[in-house]
Amino acid sequence: MFKLNEMDREYRFGDSGPKYLMNGPRMKFGVVVLQGGQDFKRHYHNIMEENFFIIEGEIEFDVDGEIVVCKKGDYIHVEPGESHYLKNTTDKPAKAAFMLAPYQEQDKVEE
């Protein structure tokens, strides 16, 4: 067992991007913040599934060409091999928790 407070970690880009709270051994877990207009590069995973739970704001997901707008309280599941792109199309920050499993250290493929 271990306990960690989100405030103990930093976002990759200062006030935005991913913040990893757990990296393995069986899953990766973190939070991601997208400021208004920001996006996260299109990518896919060969082995890991990726799941997002929207904590605040609104995020537009493009999963294999299908556009889905998710807002606070929504959950979205992305299968291995499904290409996905995230964008905050609003002018307000958006925040989501994300989980990837089964954990693989090198499984992200950027397009």
Image (cartoon, helix red, strand yellow):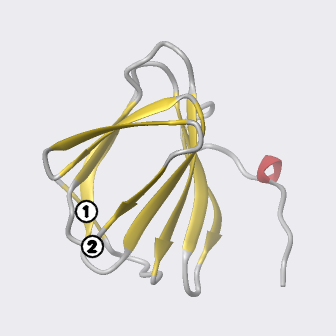
| SS assignment at label 1 | strand
- The image position of residue 14, as x and y in percent, is 62, 34
Say which residue appears at 81% left-offset and 52% top-offset.
Answer: 8
- The image position of residue 20, as x and y in percent, is 61, 59
Say which residue appears at 42% left-offset and 81% top-offset.
Answer: 104
Q: Quadrant of residue 40 in the image?
A: top left
Callouts 1 and 2 close, C-beta under 8 Å: yes
- Does residue 110 appear left or right of residue 57 in this picture? left
Residue under numbered circle 1: 44
- Dot 1 alpha-carbon crowd within 10 angstroms: few under 14, some 14 to 19, many 20 or more: many
Residue under numbered circle 2: 80
Amino acid carrying label 1: it is: Tyr
Q: Earlier in the sequence, mark 1 or mark 2?
A: 1
- The image position of residue 89, as x and y in percent, is 37, 21
- Seen in the picture, residue 23 relative to 25 is either above or below; the reply is above
Say which residue appears at 83% left-offset and 64% top-offset.
Answer: 4
Q: Quadrant of residue 86 in the image?
A: top left
- The image position of residue 77, as x and y in percent, is 39, 62
* Image quarter of the N terminus: bottom right
